[in-house]
């Protein structure tokens, strides 16, 4: 992943040093690699990608999921898949996405044109659709789920394999700031760089690095980037897998 969430010059501005270049220590190339590492760390902490430019690089291949049965007030039973990452980019066979659902005795890719399945990119357009998506929450719904699988268990309790892309359109300011802090922590950690001048009454570089690290985590925590605020039903054999009645 390239340096997307912030720039080397923004890190330099934060540290109050001259812009990084090919002749500075660290070089601009090294700082950009630190940014990339900080980005990946944030992605792992949040189960998310925070820019469309990271979507194709943040593909998930064949995520193993269980399907939760959700019964409405009528007789229909829907299947609900909660993906690990969110929001998802609208599922598209042309982009390499796959939605392999266990059906009787084999997995069927709902996105492949040969299977003639109809879908919707919104949870409000569900009439006569075989599946639909809540892209913001990373949730996929399967119509008439009890009917298509005849309640036959899937192999190894894996009801579906999903290949998809996920990302927020543009990087939020708090994510940008957290990336700057994580990157600055990595730079300040190396006392040999003599990058951050220390006065008699200032913190040493190691302490500054620790403080930067703590501030980055505080930003992610305070803005609730580390927790999802809706029911999860994604893990193989995990909690929330079962019958749920909608109001």
Image (cartoon, helix red, strand yellow):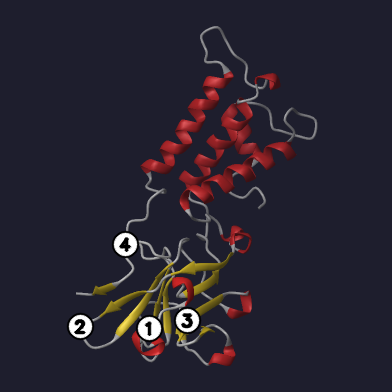
- What is the spatial separation of the Cα atoms under label 4 and label 2, in whole angstroms? 20 Å
For the residues bearing labels 3 and 1, Cβ distance under 8 angstroms: no
**How far apart are the two marked residues, 4 and 3, measured between alpha carbons?**
23 Å
Badge number at residue 231: 4
The picture places residue 132, in percent across and down from the top left corner, at 42, 80
Tag shown at residue 125? 1
Question: Could you tell which of marks 1 and 4 lies nearer the N-terminus?
Answer: 1
- In the rendered image, residue 6, in percent from the top left (x then y), is placed at 59, 44
| SS under mark 1 | loop
Q: Are marks 4 and 2 in contact (CB under 8 Å)?
A: no
SS label for mark 4: loop
Rendering coords of residue 143 (x, y %): 37, 85
Number of numbered callouts drawn: 4
In the image: residue 193, left or right of residue 58? right
Is 64 or 246 nearer to us in this picture? 64
Query: Between disc 3 and disc 1, whose residue precedes?
Result: 3
Report, in whole angstroms, how far the alpha carbon at label 3 lies from the one at label 2: 25 Å
């Amino acid at each position: 992943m390239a340096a997307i969430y912030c720039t080397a010059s923004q890190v330099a501005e934060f540290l109050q040093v001259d812009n990084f270049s090919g002749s500075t220590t660290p070089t601009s190339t090294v700082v950009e690699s630190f940014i990339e590492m900080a980005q990946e760390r944030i992605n792992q902490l949040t189960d998310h990608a925070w820019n469309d430019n990271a979507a194709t690089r943040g593909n998930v291949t064949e995520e193993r999921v269980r399907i939760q049965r959700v019964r409405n007030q009528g007789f229909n039973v829907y299947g609900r898949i909660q993906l690990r990452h969110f929001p998802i980019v609208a599922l598209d066979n042309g982009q390499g996405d796959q939605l392999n659902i266990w059906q009787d005795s084999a997995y069927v890719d709902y996105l492949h044109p040969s299977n003639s399945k109809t879908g919707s990119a919104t949870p409000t357009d569900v009439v006569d659709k075989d599946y639909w998506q809540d892209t913001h929450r990373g949730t996929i719904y399967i119509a008439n789920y009890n009917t298509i699988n005849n309640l036959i268990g899937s192999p190894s309790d894996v009801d579906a394999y999903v290949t998809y892309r996920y990302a927020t359109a543009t990087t939020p300011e708090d994510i940008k700031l957290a990336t700057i802090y994580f990157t600055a922590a990595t730079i300040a950690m190396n006392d040999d760089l003599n990058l951050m001048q220390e006065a008699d009454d200032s913190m040493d570089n190691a302490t500054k690095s620790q403080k930067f690290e703590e501030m980055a985590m505080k930003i992610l925590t305070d803005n609730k980037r580390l927790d999802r605020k809706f029911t999860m039903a994604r893990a193989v054999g995990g909690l929330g897998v079962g019958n749920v009645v909608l109001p």
